[in-house]
Amino acid sequence: MASAHTALPRQSKINLRARSPWAQLFMRLVRNVPAFIGLLFVLAFFLVAIFANVLSPYSYDKQDLDNVEKPPSALHLAGTDTLGRDMLSRLIYGTRSSAFVVLLVTAVNLLLGVPLGAIAGYFGGAVDNFIMRVADILFAFPGLLFTFLIAATVRPAILDWARANGLGDLARTGYLDYAVVILALGLIGWAGLARFVRAQVLAVKEREYVVSARSTGVPTSKVILRHILPNALAPIIVMLSMGMGFIALSEGYLSFLGIGLQPPNPSWGNIMAENAGRYWRRYPEMLWLVFIPGLLFTIIVLAFSFLGDGLNEALNPEID
Amino acid sequence: MAEKSDNRWLIGVVVILVVALVGAVCVGAGALLFLSQQPTTAQTSPVPGGVSTPGSSAPKPGAPPAATRAPSSAARNVLRLPGEEPPTLDPALTGDASSAEYVVEIFSGLVMLDKNLKVAPDIAEGWKVSEDGKTYTFTLRKDARFHDGRPVTAQDFKYSIERTANPALASHTAETYLGDIVGVKEKLNRKAQAVDGVKVIDDYTVEIKIDAPKAYFLAKLTFPTAYIVDKNNVERGGRTWTDKPNGTGPYKLQEYVRGQRIILAKNDNFYLDPKPTVATVEYILAGGSAMTMYENGDMEVVPVGLSDIERVSDPASPLNKELYTGPRLSTGFVVFNTRKPPFDDPKVRQAFALAIDRQKLVDVVYRKMPSVATTILPPGMPGYKESDAKPAFDAAKAKQLLAESKYAGKLPEVTWTTTGGGGTTPQGIQAMAAMLKENLGVNVSIQQTDWATFIGQLNDPAKNPYQIFDIGWIADYADPENFLSILFRSGSTQNWAAYSNPEVDKILDQAGSEKDLTKRFALYQQVEQMILADNPVLPLTFEREYWLTKPYVKDMLYPPLIIPRLRYVSLAK
């Protein structure tokens, strides 16, 4: 990885004239080959998720018990699983589950982590102490255990509530119970971001322009939003982008353990879990059943990492 | 902002991923390699750990040697097998197979089922039945003792029955298995303090009166509900008395760590022959791959699952020689809760039943391990009538029935409840849900719950919240009454479908007291057809036993129903 970077043209040579900062950023990003590849995969990931219903050749739960465990062929590009369902369609819909979770958890992290971190950093004192101690507690709390707890206690109640209030269709699609579990993951995931934003705020809040804004009577909310956060935006973007790969992976292990999306709704994790039993026993005969979702995990985690890495360099050109 | 640490971070991710992938791919083979290096030192007694120099304190007797390797299982006389977490170990509350498995070894009753599934003497050495078939007089063995050495007397039996019938205990099996005894129903309904039908004649003689002559009464006494418990043990132990049960059975509960293991130790004072020979029987409750443990020599006995059946059935496989297959008096059902919409409409039940292609399910998903069920009674059950009818499957008719039902076009939400915690939904249930979607256009959501919660909800058919669910029933004794009356008579606590048909009830009662076997079985066959026509359940599979046994395990039994079996087993050195 390191050698790939040194082989690239140095960012300082890029012509930066007459372009908006965002365009400059984009140019710097796409000239970084791993980051560009990462970006392409990430875009493909979200596009496949959005157009899953258009792209998949079959329905994800259409079973054909006369054609089970067929290897990849022209008819089924990724083969069929133990119930004769088209693996490609399931993987495509699994992408949708994965993207759904990635966006949701990131949004929760962002909405909680940034304001809480900014408030803690800006006000300091008792407020800071309180927020950061809560963050410390969350840091110490094993995320998986917390998710199990939510799955066992809150989820059934929410599902019952949804069914009783005419949201049965939503409950049935599985996305609702998924959302509950993943929100749990998001609820504890904000701590890292809050700690980070707090550090950024602490670093800029004593700068002259902030002090002068405050001294001229600019309201606190405006000081934070207009003067402090924009300066912390770049690292936040980097951090979120890098975190997305891990969120995709978390979704994978939750579904693998059976507490994420419930079958027959597919997720890469539960596709792996469902087929694992057969796969081990007849290894290496049915590679496609587990290997393909595993490969997708690898690709998407790497893609998010490369993208995050590239963003980091693009946003901080002085680092060279 | 961290500078060059980004690369380190990336490398870290790559390393983690590579390790995870390689690890995942190798788990099967890796575990095999690692575990196969287990020691096989043959030592018959534990050696004290460490060197005891003169003057130093002697090693504690019984303490296992710390650093010595474990001798082989046969040498240690240990039988290890996978077990399931029992919802209870209290005989009075036992109503499911996973509890009964342990309870029949730790406790015992007046009578038991022997290897041939016939009612045989246990604590009672003999009995007499009166002319009218309503009074049973049992003579108890004088050498039967509790695990703590106290002799078992007729009072203990009376105490146990009255405890089970005590409404405060809320035993859901009491009425099912003891309801024939005069006075049990009265006590359960708080109309009597004592159970009048059980009379202590002297210390070793007890008389039981039942309300009508019943062909199956003795067989019912072989079920744990009628087992003997120790009053002191129950009263001093409080709510958790079953953690240290003082039973009478061939094995004692030595250790029970929830979610981990149940260890039974042999009862040297057991009163029947053959006496138990295997010193300890260890049930592993913690999931894991039992099959891998078996192959590595960490288990003596293991059931064969769907993933392994093809491999094990292959005559070229060395495991094939260790394979046992045999019948099991058990039927797997899809149950429609007749109290819950939409299954209160028989047409919906019939539509759902017709939309499931059982033959294909068994052939493809279950890999022909069980056979397709078309009747409630399994083959081998007295009264079973073989039917050459093909399992009914008719998608067109199913659709039509659904359209004729009162829920046509406005079918409520349907949730299928199945057992299992974590892990993924059983493939069979997914396959059936997909069949319902394809053949009926019904979206069925699947909900998983653990066995104890599941069985707890089923025990109260009037309040059971599940609409549609899958469950099996294994015979308690070889009599058709055990399936047809217990599962389908109105008001029975095991009537999962909350099914009620006065005509069926009438014939069931008639069959129960019919003495002529041919007539009796004809009645049961008639009633079985009546029940099937109403579709409270869809018989799905007739289960079979598939087990692997290590060659050094002798006389391990895999009976078609649950009987005390461990005392027959021995391990060759």
Image: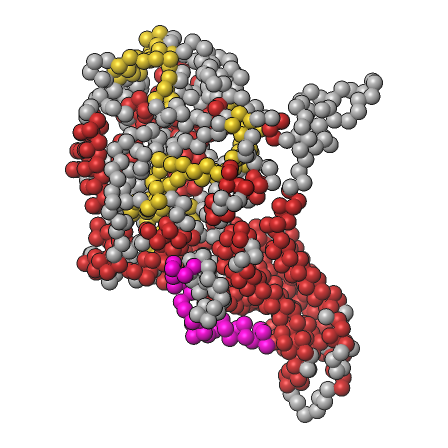
Position of residue B266 in the picture relative to residue B458 (left or right): right
In reply to whether residue A114 is colored magenta, the answer given is no
Taking the view exactly as shown, the residue that stands out farthest to the right is B54
Q: Who is closer to the viewer here, A215 or B92? A: B92
Q: Residue sitting at 67 percent across and 33 percent down? A: B40
One can see residue B253 in this view: no
Q: Residue at x 53, y 73 (%)?
A: A46
User: What's the residue at 68%, 82% (across, down)?
Assistant: A31
The percent coordinates of residue B557 (x first, y second) are: 45, 30
Looking at the rendered structure, the number of numbered marks drawn on it comes to 0
Q: Nearer the viewer, residue A173 or B76?
A: B76
Q: Nearer the viewer, residue B462 or B223?
A: B223
Instruction: Judge whether A81 appears above or below B509 on screen.
Output: below
The answer to whether B51 appears left or right of B46 in the picture is right
- On whether residue A55 falls in the magenta region, the answer is yes
Residue at far front of view: B316
Span shown in magenta: A40-68
Q: Quadrant of residue B155?
A: top left
Q: Position of residue B564 (x, y in %)?
A: 44, 26
Residue B275 x/y as whole percent: 49, 18
